[in-house]
Amino acid sequence: MTYTYNQDRIWRSVLLERERQEYLKEKGKFPWTCADAAPASMKFTVLGEEFGEVARAVCEQDWKNLREELIQTAAVCVAWVEALDSGR
């Protein structure tokens, strides 16, 4: 598989969203992110909420918002993998 400029742009968007999640946690908007030690059931709830927003964007044919929601969903998945890889 060839790595493309578009893939690089997508991964940068996901990483920026991960940084935003951590920033919002620091500012008190969230008590934790999926990268933290939290029960899998709670992380699954967060992922489900993000997936629901993707579904809503699709149903409403809100293609501009769809990209943002997909990036947020991907960032939640990345955060969860971070937690798994670090034993949290």
Image (tube, rainbow, N blue to C red):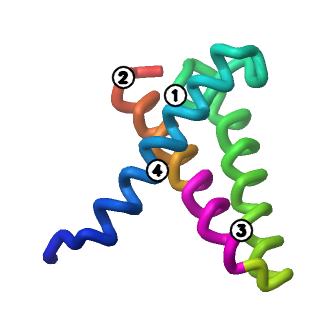
> Residue at coordinates 58% horizontally, 34% vertically from top-left?
20
Relative height, residue 39 to residue 63 (above, below): above
Amino acid, disc 1: Ala
- Mark 2 vs 4, N-terminal side: 4
Q: Secondary structure at mark 4?
A: helix
From mark 1 to mark 2, how far is it between C-alphas? 9 Å
Q: From the image, tell me which residue sits under label 4.
A: 14
Instruction: Determine the image quadrant of residue 7.
Output: bottom left
Q: Is residue 56 left or right of residue 85?
A: right
Residue 35: mark in rendering: 1
Q: Residues within 10 Å of mark 1 (few under 14, many from 20)?
A: many
Mark 1 residue element? loop
The Cα atoms of the two marked residues, 3 and 2, are separated by 32 Å
Which label is found at residue 65? 3
Secondary element type, mark 2:
loop
Q: Position of residue 50 (x, y in %)?
A: 71, 54
Give the label on residue 86, or none: 2
Neighbor class of circle 4 (other Cα within 10 Å; few <14, some 14-19, many 20+) is many
Please state which amino acid type lies under the numbered disc 3: Asn
Write the start and end of the magenta stretch as one range: 63-73
Mark closer to the observer (2, 4): 4
